[in-house]
Amino acid sequence: MGIWVINWRVELSQFILINWLIATMNKYVWWFSKQIKSIFLTIVDIDKLLDTFDDIPEIKWINNLTPFNYKEWDINISHLSFWYNECNVFDNFSLKINWWKKTALVWDSGSWKTTLMKLIAWYIHPDLGEIFVDNQNICEINLISYYKHIGYLTQEPSVFDWTIIENLTYALDREPIFDEIENVIKASRCEFIYDLPNKLKTEIWERWIKLSGWQKQRLAIAKIMLKNPSIILLDEPTSALDSISEQYISEALHNLFDWKTVIIIAHRLQTVKEADEIIVLKKWQIIERWNHEMLCEIEKGEYKKMLDLQTSF
Ligand SMILES: Nc1ncnc2c1ncn2[C@@H]1O[C@H](COP(=O)(O)OP(=O)(O)OP(=O)(O)O)[C@@H](O)[C@H]1O
Ligand SMILES: [Mg+2]
């Protein structure tokens, strides 16, 4: 470029303009990579990162200035409607989830469970209606400050091609204590880590060390336990586990997530038995709402029917 200027092929004004354009572009690339890095460091789930790339216009939400304040953790879904293309998924759906409670959502088949979790996590946005967390409309708050308080276990957790310890700790904004990691490994039944060649420093690499579905699921649970957020979203947390591990993990989840606002979605009712409140939904209607013992008392109740079906074989 400088040579062209010397040879007067490019006028000085054009040279300045081009340099200005390059500098501006650099600024945006830098801004964009900084935002991506912030999301990356604050969330537990790397799928969000991929979703972000699919959903770039929505990146504006992360720059909202109002920080997310946490005092109480009621989640209030108000008159929510959502469409996937032409298909109406939620129609005027309202639900209040109490703070510091473990709430399980149990649906009849053919529902939109993961979609609801993604809406609460603000991965996708409602077409109509609002979601309030702690009386704050999540479309108006700074997303990064929101994610600092959220742990989201997706149905098919993914891992990076990094070491186990890096996968466990990348969402933390502090150095974990060794004992803390040990305890979490035990509570999430991640002892398989100690059988790997370099234990916590083992690199996960698809062609070399590949984790199975249940190992990834346990690792994702360990990650949330270590992050210790105030709102925890669990989408089928034990779906990849055998029944003995399922029971153990269910108990560990319920003990460790005391004094948190937890939403659990599970097909298998074993996982939801300990919840403070179980909400049974049919389409978009709440048809039963109580704890396990009380729901079992309802003769011909929907929950009891599902439970009988699951325990009959
Ligand atoms: N991005 C999308 N675009 C269009 N349709 C989608 C999209 N994501 C999901 N769906 C459809 O929405 C429906 C419900 O999906 P969702 O994952 O919420 O169900 P789910 O209740 O969690 O199912 P499962 O029990 O298998 O976990 C499915 O029919 C799915 O094909
Ligand atoms: Mg699902």
Image (tube, grey):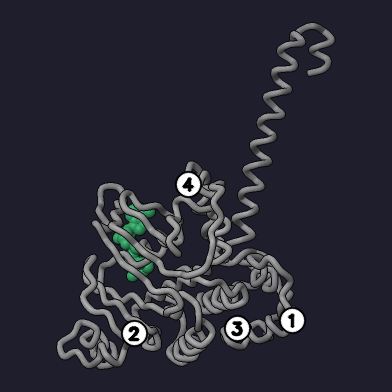
The quadrant of the rendering that contains the C terminus is bottom left
Q: How crowded is mark 1: few (under 14 residues within 10 Å), some or many (20 or more)?
A: few
Q: Which residue is drawn at 52% across and 50% down?
A: 52
Query: In this orientation, does residue 49 appear?
Result: no
What residue sits right under mark 1 in the picture? 178
Given this view, does label 3 or label 1 mark the residue nearer the observer? 1
Mark 3 vs mark 4: which is more N-terminal?
4
Q: Where is residue 43 in the image (x, y as percent from the top left)?
A: 57, 62
Amino acid residing under circle 4:
Asp
212 shown above or below 292: above
What residue sits right under mark 4 in the picture? 55
Q: Distance between the residues labelled 1 and 4?
A: 37 Å
Q: In this view, does 157 lie to the left or right of 196?
A: left
What residue sits right under mark 2 in the picture? 269
Amino acid residing under circle 2:
Leu
Q: In this view, does 64 lie to the left or right of 181?
A: left
What residue sits right under mark 3 in the picture? 190
Q: How far apart are marks 2 and 1 (CA)?
A: 34 Å
